[in-house]
Amino acid sequence: MPVRPGAKDTAMPAFWKRLPLLLIVLAAVAGAVLLRDRLSFAALAENRAALLAFRDAHYGQAVAAFVAAYVAIVAFSLPGATVATLTGGFLFGTFPGVLFNVAGASIGAVLIFLAARAGLGAGVAQRVAAQGGAGARLMAALRENEWSVLFLMRLVPAVPFFLANLIPAFTGTRLWPFAVTTFLGILPATLVFTSIGAGLSEVFARGETPDLGVIFAPHVLLPLLGLAALAALPMVLKMFRKGAA
């Protein structure tokens, strides 16, 4: 069968655009199988002395290695993001540990967002917009309330973190709002888990595991819900204005 002129030229760029996303999928599958036990709280407890010794001897390298590892965990959707957040608090304290955690998570989220958008996102968004219907209306609504929706996706963890990285890539979300809302939106919950990690020395001494259910305690949950309500306020105001018009 004859090859249409230019078909190979257009197929190869499409392959290279999708290659990062394919690598992420392969790494996620491999990580789920091979790293589940190595990126766990038990592994952190077992290696805590070595980690602290390396931090004390090479602080700058420890920071760089930690942030790079966190970026890889998020970008490749590997298991262990919660343990990584606890590790950031354990090694570097609540502050600056929370900044290292948020930086690693945000950079990783941006990388997977860009990979998904380059591989499939732009084409999916264009096809949905061209077809019209409910899908196009939903995408238009997301764009109209872009900042509020993105903040809500981060503040209220009803959407898994990796899906919150992929969905915006498939709906034509711009990079800047995605990056800003990711950094600011994950900050409150990350601060809570980082502070838990900062107290792990006592937990290790007692031979216990940290209580991550503290995120649902009223003094933690209510402020988070308040922030979510503030994020949703612009959408509510727009609905009222449209109803009054």
Image (tube, rainbow, N blue to C red):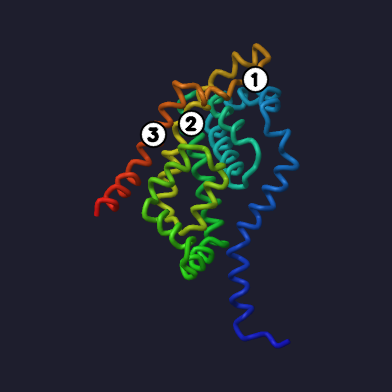
Q: What residue is shown with label 2?
A: 189
Query: Alpha carbon of mark 2 to alpha carbon of mark 3: how far?
Result: 11 Å
Give the residue at mark 1.
Answer: 209
Left or right: 159, with 140 as reference point: right
- Amino acid type for the residue under numbered disc 3: Leu
Q: Quadrant of residue 196?
A: top right
Q: Which residue is mark 3?
A: 227
Q: Sort mark 2 into few (<14), some (14-19) or many (20+) by Cα contacts within 10 Å.
A: some
Inter-mark Cα distance, 1 to 3? 29 Å
Q: Which callout, 2 or 1, points at the residue further toward the start of the chain? A: 2
Amino acid type, label 2: Ala
Q: Which mark is residue 3?
A: none
Q: Is residue 173 above or below residue 236?
A: below
Distance from disc 2 to disc 1, alpha carbons, whole Å, reads 19 Å
Q: Residue furthest bottom?
A: 2
Residue 24 locus on image (x, y percent): 64, 52
In the picture as drawn, the residue positioned furthest to the left comes out as 245
Residue at the image position 60 percent from the left and 39 percent from the top: 69
Which residue sits at x=39%, y=34%? 227
Q: Nearer the viewer, mark 2 or mark 3?
A: 3
Question: How many numbered dots are placed on residues in this image?
Answer: 3
Where does the image place residue 127, in percent across and percent down from the top left?
51, 68
* N-term-proximal mark, 1 vs 3: 1
